[in-house]
Structure formats: structure tokens, C-alpha cells
Amino acid sequence: MRILDPHIHMTSRTTDDYEAMYASGVRVVVEPAFWLGQPRTGVGSFTDYFDSLLGWERFRAAQFGIRHHATIALNPKEANDPRCREVLAEIPRYLLKDGVVAVGEVGYDSMTPEEDEVFATQLQMAREAELPVLVHTPHRDKLAGTRRTLDVVVESGLPPERVLVDHLNETNVALVRDAGAWAGFSIYPDTKMDEDRMVAILQEYGTERMIVNSAADWGRSDPLKTAKTGHAMLAAGFSEDDVDQVLWRNPVAFYGQSGNLVLDPVPGFTEGAPPTPGVEFEGSSVLRGARA
């Protein structure tokens, strides 16, 4: 089983998690910029965080044989804090950096006018940078939030195939599918979606444009939920090819639109060996377009 976890917050995880993920089949991850729990009070804390995602975390993952990528954005929750808005002027230069495969997480938290404005602004950034977009649907009023999300995407002129709408459930998956966007599902221990419900959704809607992630962060979560979903699919009668499509080929196709997705094995990594401080990034090929 080969896995690209398309939404996981490794800044919040330990090196033990990286080792366990590699053993379960994870070879590539995408880490979206998100809220850290503690409110940020200025633009410098954002740029330090972005630099860490594109530098230290990328290096840390490589030590354990995993390719790390990031998405960059002002997240919906902090879009409501005027102290954070200045970071919008900094984001375009980060979208040009190695390892950035999308704009995200963007979208809605509380459906405020401020979130409307920041969402539309960052969709325009994605158009200008020719990057796909990772969209966060709100935890409350999810159906209304999804409808508004899709309306704003249409207004932006961004093609729906360049948009991944995440944190879906049974109430809104059909809306996203009908709009032509990619459907994302976060598999959690207690909330959002579990493996069995995910299998039922795949049985109803099929595997095309369906993306499964762990969204593991600093809360109660599990970075092995992608692998566990794959095993649940097999137990329910899905083929190994179906699992490969959902856990690998679909996220590769979506993020491959960035032209920045690296799938090569990490040079110098030996499974089971201690981490190698001298892992190099130079010389590896970059995915141009979507391919397996």
C-alpha cells in the first residue's frame, strides 16, 4: 500500500509518528498552513511558521523517508483577526517557493464578511500563481458553508478541478461532486469521519475525485488513519487498485497540478537505519503535471 497523506499537520506530530507512517506505507505528505491553537498577534509569527514548514519540517520528514510538501494561506479562523490580515501581502512570495503545492487552508470558519473577503482574495492569488486550492469547510453549518464555498469558487473563475473541498461528510459530498471539484474527507477518532462511514461513501459515490486524509494535528487524531481506511476498503471488497487510486493516484493527480510535487524516494534514506542528518534535496526530479 502506497500512501500520500494529502492533509496532515506534522508540525504537531513526533518523529515516532513519522516512523510509524513510513511503516504503514506513507511516502509523501502535504501539510497545510493552519491555526496553531494559540492566537497569533502579528505577521512575523506567520512568516516564521511558513519558513518552518518549507525548511525544517521538510528536512525532518526526509530523515524518515517521507517527502514533505506544504500549502500556504491565511486560515479562515484567523481571517477574522485584524492583526493577522497583513500576512496577505506576504503570501504571494511564499507561493513561489519549492515544496508549495497549493493555496490553503482557505474557506470558512464562522461565515463572516471578513472570511468572505480573505477567501476571495486568496482564490485570486491561486489563479495568479497557477496553483490548486485546498478549502476548509466550517465545522458548524457545514452544508450552508459548502454551498457558499462553491459559489465563491464559481465567482473567482477558478476551474473546479483545481479545488479540493475538505472535511466533507454525508451531507455535502454530493454538492461537491456535482460541482466538479475534488472531495476530501478527514478520518478522525471521534469527529468528522471514520473508516466505516468513509467506505460507505466510496461504495455510494465511487473512487473518482475522492481524497482521504488523516488531518492529524495537536488534537486527538491519528496519523495512520489513511492506512486504516485502506485496510477497511479491502475488508469491504474494494480492490488493491481502488485503494491505490484513493490513497495515492487521486492526491497525486490533484497536487500534481502545481508542478511542484516530488515523488522520488528520499536520497540516502535506508529503512530501519537511524536518521541521516545530511539528507540532500538537490538532484531529485519534480512532478510536472499529474502522473502516478
Image (cartoon, helix red, strand yellow):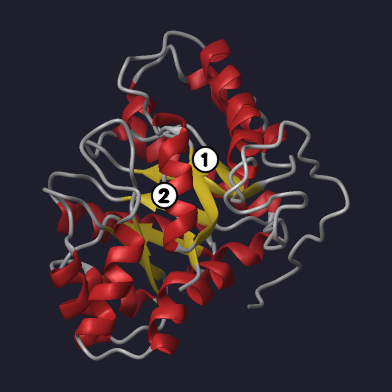
- Three-letter amino acid code of the residue under disc 1: Thr
Among numbered discs 2 and 1, the one appearing first in the sequence? 2
Closer to us: 210 or 182: 210
Q: Is residue 207 left or right of residue 188?
A: right
Q: Residue at x 30, y 30 (%)?
A: 218
Q: Residue furthest front?
A: 273
Query: Looking at the rendering, in which quadrant would you find the N terminus?
Result: bottom left
Q: In which quarter of the image is residue 112?
A: top left
Relative image position of residue 115 (x, y in whole percent): 35, 35
Closer to us: 265 or 53: 265
The residue at which mark 1 appears reads as 121
Q: Which of marks 2 and 1 is in front?
A: 2
Q: Is residue 245 above or below residue 12?
A: below
Spatial CA span between label 2 and label 1: 38 Å
Residue 20 - label: 2
Q: Is residue 163 left or right of residue 69?
A: left
- Three-letter amino acid code of the residue under disc 2: Ala
Q: Residue at x 16, y 59 (%)?
A: 143
Relative image position of residue 227 (x, y in whole percent): 35, 64
